[in-house]
Image (spheres, rainbow, N blue to C red):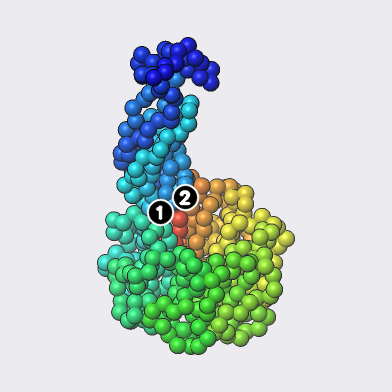
Amino acid sequence: MATYSSVQYSGIWNLSSQANARGANTWPAPPGAPTIGTATAGNASASVTFTAPADPGVPATITSYTATSSPGGFTGTGSASPITVSGLTNGTAYTFTVTATNATGTGPASAASNSVTALAYLFMWGTGASGKLALGNTINYSSPKQVGSLTTWVSSASSSVSASFVKSDGTLWTSGSGFAGGLGLGNTTDYSSPKQVGALTNWLLVTSGNYYSVAIKTDGTLWGWGQNNNGQLGLGDLTARSSPVQVGALTNWSKISAGNRFCVSVKTDGTLWSWGLGSSGQLGFGNTTNYSSPKQVGALTNWLSIACGYTWSLAIKTDGTLWSWGDNSQGQLGVGASYYSSPKQVGALTTWSKARGSWFSSTAIKTDGTLWSWGGNSLGQLGLGNTTAYNSPKQVGSGTTWSQISGGQYHFISIKTNGTLWTWGYGGYGTLGLGNTTDYSSPKQVGSRTSWITLGGGLSPFTSSAIAII
């Protein structure tokens, strides 16, 4: 058989110098597959260990390794084990493969790693009435209390009597009062620990009003259950349901918010829809009529996000403008003292990023990270250091690191960009999570943890929830 000698391959490999060590007719090739080790979850990340394949040596020495996630295709690179993969979604399960690369190319992938979930623990606090804290009892807690030991929670929502949760596997869970079938479990029983709603694994998000909930699945369908005395389920009637029932047949629902017996939603095409109780003009149709089926608000297609207050609504458009309509008894619309039964722009700014309502107050975050509030303030819920009501937005302090906001009856809760958690307003029942029942009219930090990642939704009086990495 022929042998090669004194030949340069691509200017990097002298075959005669390699022949003695590697044998005749041996050409450069990509590395073999690494042997997968163990994946360990972190905060929106995972560390992946592996054993390197045999290194062929110069000039085909392994120069780097790449770990790739499934799902998502997130990658991390390094020169040795372990490799950290960042950008993961907390609460989502991932596996990983590793490849090795040399000057010739990238070799085959390793076998998949064990499945890990970027850690996401659920915490709740405040009143435990009806078991809605999901802690197995009806006790009040004035500091955040971990719900079980699972690390797969991705969202939560609370009402006055119940709570709903979605896990990373797409399952839906509820706890609290089962009045009117509000837990979606096919009965009217109260439960103080999370109970799974059916067996489906394609729930995406859920929001809750008093004794009812609405949710969107990953296929874009909309579902409702619980009390329906004002048509708040959107099912075309006033009949309560104790299990989830699909609202119409459309598959393009994107976002949903629930108020006091009414809902507002945005579709994937940017249109705005509402239904349920309309007595304060909160549906945005220019009247005070109730509607038991979804009805489009105007004809615009640039609605981005929505948030229901108790009997009024907030929305942000894709151009960054903020709009409100409905009850304005305490200035919560932010447009002066008048009521509006159709969307009214709040000021002229185009820098609004997030907005949330409570029972009589509003808060919003701008794109510059500043926090603003307006409306009722009898218990300091505006965070302005006083109890004065305002009918136009006022900045809360001078900070520019506010990231998320959520509201309850007379309190608000927020996360900053550094992962710290802050609350203010009514402290009864331990609602603020500060270890007491004191009211605070300025934001106060909850503990010292810097790993809070998302807040619970809903308009729950005296209850708060959030998800953190611990």
- Callout 1–callout 2 Cβ contact below 8 Å: yes
Q: Which residue is drawn at 48% across and 28% down?
A: 104
Who is closer to the viewer here, 17 or 371? 17
Residue that protrudes farthest toward the right in the picture? 348
Who is closer to the viewer here, 216 or 427? 216
Q: Where residue 204 appears, x then y in whole percent?
A: 46, 64
Who is closer to the viewer here, 211 or 392? 211
The residue mark sitting in front, 1 or 2, is: 2
Q: Where residue 227 appears, x then y in whole percent?
A: 43, 82
Q: Which residue is drawn at 34% across and 80% down?
A: 186
Report the amino acid beneath label 1.
Thr
Drawn side of residue 270 relative to residue 451, left or right: right
Q: Where residue 465 appears, x then y in whole percent?
A: 40, 61
Report the amino acid beneath label 2.
Gly
Category of crowding for the residue at label 1, using alpha-carbon neighbours closer than 10 angstroms: few (below 14), some (14–19), many (at least 20): many
The residue pinned by badge 2 equals 72
Relative to 78, is 296 above or below? Answer: below
The residue pinned by badge 1 equals 92
